[in-house]
Amino acid sequence: MLSSVGYCKILATVMPLFGKSQKSPTEVVRALKEAVNALERGDKKAEKAQEDVSKNLVLIKNMLYGTSDAEPQTDIIVAQLAQELYNSNLLLLLIQNLSRIDFEGKKDVAQVFNNILRRQIGTRSPTVEYICTKPEILFTLMRGYEHQEIALNCGTMLRECARYEALAKIMLYSDDFFNFFRYVEVSTFDIASDAFSTFKELLTRHKILCAEFLEVNYDKVFSHYQRLLNSENYVTRRQSLKLLGELLLDRHNFTVMTRYISNPDNLKLMMNMLKEKSRNIQFEAFHVFKVFVANPNKPKPILDILLRNQEKLVDFLTRFHTERSEDEQFNDEKAYLIKQIKELKPAAEH
């Protein structure tokens, strides 16, 4: 027989966060799904549905994160909650209806999503496995950049997804990935900036995956990339030029780098960007230009351009950003390039 003290202890462990009214994960998920469906239908009870969505999102968030008065729920409760979210298809439903949810609710959706995504059982990430079977979740999040009122919330969730190679692979190899070349140029600065952060994360986080993707899709990626480098938007040009330098100098991308620096049009573009009005763009262009010059196996068309401009380049580089006297690495690289260009000889003389 249980003593009354023992009974009270057991009761205390299963007693909910908010007293008797606390719902189980099954009940909260069911209530939230019904409220989101009502919100989607847009019937007369939309205002009540809006309140119910917000209320149940807070309940789920508190289960996961706890509150100032209560700890997060136990692993067993959280596991049950996650399973209910998977079985009900509620993650996708929430994302599809994100624009209908109020401001605080949108933030709660992102917090709940990211917490559930990070859940681990040993080395497994069950939510990552679940999303791999429901890639529409990722595609819907990516298209979130089309809608100003949810773009930043979707960006928060996308970058969390991008940390997992399996999810990053689905995103990179989807047709939706190429929409990022449009999203990074939208007129709203914070959305363009957020989209660029996600774009960069997808192209740099998982080195081997990214290198393979760039090799397989080289022509398509770099024809789109060329447009970013020629963009009329200064921030887009500068960010994409900086990222290009990082991509080319990453040893995993050796094949991509070799191909890029064998194209004379790319060299001409960088030489023009060295002369841009913006000193920041000049500086980023320098870091791409140096890869062309440092290549020991320059194809003839590249060598010809450098030889034709040999004197001009030496003169130009000697006077290039001389105020950066404190930047030792830059000055060493500049001296190396000047030396390389001075010593260039036509291919026939080799």
Image: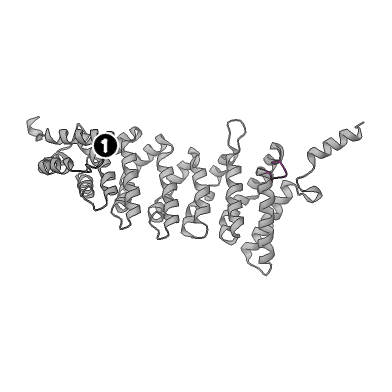
Tell me which segment is drawn in magenta.
66-72
Question: Magenta part mainly helix, strand or loop?
Answer: loop
Q: Position of residue 79 (x, y in %)?
A: 67, 39
Residue 162 x %, y %: 48, 42
124 part of magenta stretch: no
Which residue is more in the foreground, 282 or 96? 282
Return the x and y of residue 97 as percentages of the image width and height: 58, 58
The kind of secondary structure element at disc 1 is helix
**Residue in the picture at 13% in, 42% down:** 315
**Residue 175 visible within the image:** no
Whether residue 46 sits left or right of residue 209 in the image: it is right
Residue 264 appears left or right of 5: left
Query: Looking at the picture, which amino acid does disc 1 mark?
Result: Phe
- Few, some or many residues within 10 Å of mark 1 (<14, 14–19, 20+): some
Left or right: where does residue 177 sit relative to residue 319?
right
Query: Quick one: 74 or 174, which is closer to the camera?
Result: 74
- Residue in the foreground of this view, choosing between 182 and 189: 189
Residue indicated by mark 1: 330
User: Viewed as shown, does residue 210 lie left or right of 134?
Assistant: left
- Residue 30 in the image, given as x and y percentages of width and height: 70, 53
The quarter holding residue 126 reads top right
Model colouring:
one colour
**Residue 69 in magenta?**
yes
